[in-house]
Image (spheres, helix red, strand yellow):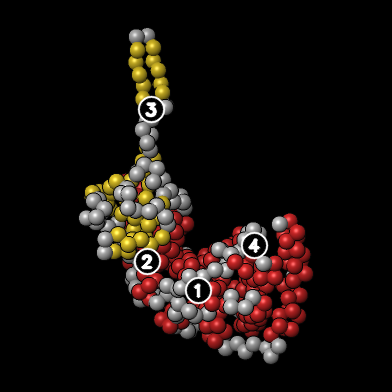
Amino acid sequence: MKKYSFIWIFLFPGIVLMSCSLSMAESYDLKDIETILKETKALCLKDNGMLWGRTLDVPILLVDKENGRIYSNNNSKKLGLNSYNEIYTGILPNFVDVIKGPAKIGNQIWAVIPLPLPEDKIERQCIILHEAFHCVQPEMDLKPEPYNNKHMDEMEARFWLKLEWKALELALQSEGENKKQAITDALCFRHYRRALYGKCDGCENRFEIHEGMAEYTAQKLCRNDKDLKTYLQNKLHAMWESPSFVNCFAYFSGPVYAYLLDKTETNWRTHLGAKDDIAAIVQSAYEISLPFDIYMEAEERSVLYSGAQIMGEELDRELAL
């Protein structure tokens, strides 16, 4: 994104002095901002509410904290914005928290997004649409109660989560009965983890609904099917070595279960609720019957997903803490 900067030149008798210390604060190019907001509008119009039954064309507030400026696709008396072609801009007011996420300003919910945004068009639009989805979640009964998944820092939780992820990755790559078996394995590993950590089910589910569905929506609207599958696989590899899974696991688990549901004829989005377990919906959609002894099955199948190697990695991590 372009910025403007200036260097002042001072002239004295016989001396030319150039100084950068008095440079003006850099500001964002309004044309670039307008392009970004037009891109967002085009994606929302293309979707036209088909994905969730509601448009994601919400008020967006891009915030340049460094220079005390804001940019938007909507006007607001409370914000006191000025028009520039098809967008609006103004001074950052004190009552706006520069924190990414939904915020109520006046009578509307705005998607507040701090600048800068990525140069890559898809990456920046995914950020914007992710936050736009958070703005409409309460209308769809997809705004869950608070959650805490601190158990995901425990060694065994990480181990069984990684096995679930490996099985989901195989499911992405497979078809027919092989896909169904990989999903079954993922569900078994998931059940095993949750059996070890009582009452964690609800918190995991809520995180996958809250952030997982926001991430799924953004990626779904910004990428074609082939690119989305590639993105999910790359996302897993990027997250694999994360020092903590507490605040990130749903960004893969949620979208990949949603992607698998999109491969069925189930109209799952119209029935999804804030308390639902999206993996259980996948199990129903694929007509999967879990084995009688889930835990024995999980232990036996773990060998096929490099279970010993993963456990070694997690033991090394535990010893390094």
| Residue corresponding to mark 2 | 135
Mark 3 falls on what kind of element?
loop
| Residue corresponding to mark 1 | 206
Image quadrant holding the C terminus, namely bottom right
Residue 9 occupies quadrant: top left
C-alpha distance separating marks 3 and 2: 41 Å
User: Does residue 150 sit above or below 177 in this rendering?
Assistant: above
| Residue 195 appears anywhere in the view | yes
Contact between marks 1 and 2 (CB within 8 A): the answer is no
User: Does residue 222 sit above or below 33 in this rendering?
Assistant: below
**Is residue 79 or residue 49 the one in the foreground?**
79
Contact between marks 3 and 2 (CB within 8 A): the answer is no
**Is residue 108 or residue 82 the one in the foreground?**
108
C-alpha distance separating marks 1 and 2: 16 Å
Kind of residue at badge 2: Cys
Kind of residue at badge 4: Trp
The reply, left or right, for residue 103 in relation to residue 225 is left
For image coordinates 73% across by 76% down, the residue present is 302
C-alpha distance separating marks 1 and 4: 22 Å
C-alpha distance separating marks 3 and 4: 46 Å
The reply, left or right, for residue 293 in relation to residue 216 is right
Residue 315 occupies quadrant: bottom right
N-term-proximal mark, 3 vs 4? 3
N-term-proximal mark, 3 vs 2? 3
C-alpha distance separating marks 1 and 3: 50 Å
| Residue 182 appears anywhere in the view | no
| Residue corresponding to mark 4 | 240
Mark 2 falls on what kind of element?
helix
Contact between marks 1 and 4 (CB within 8 A): the answer is no
**Of labels 1 and 2, the one closer to you:** 1
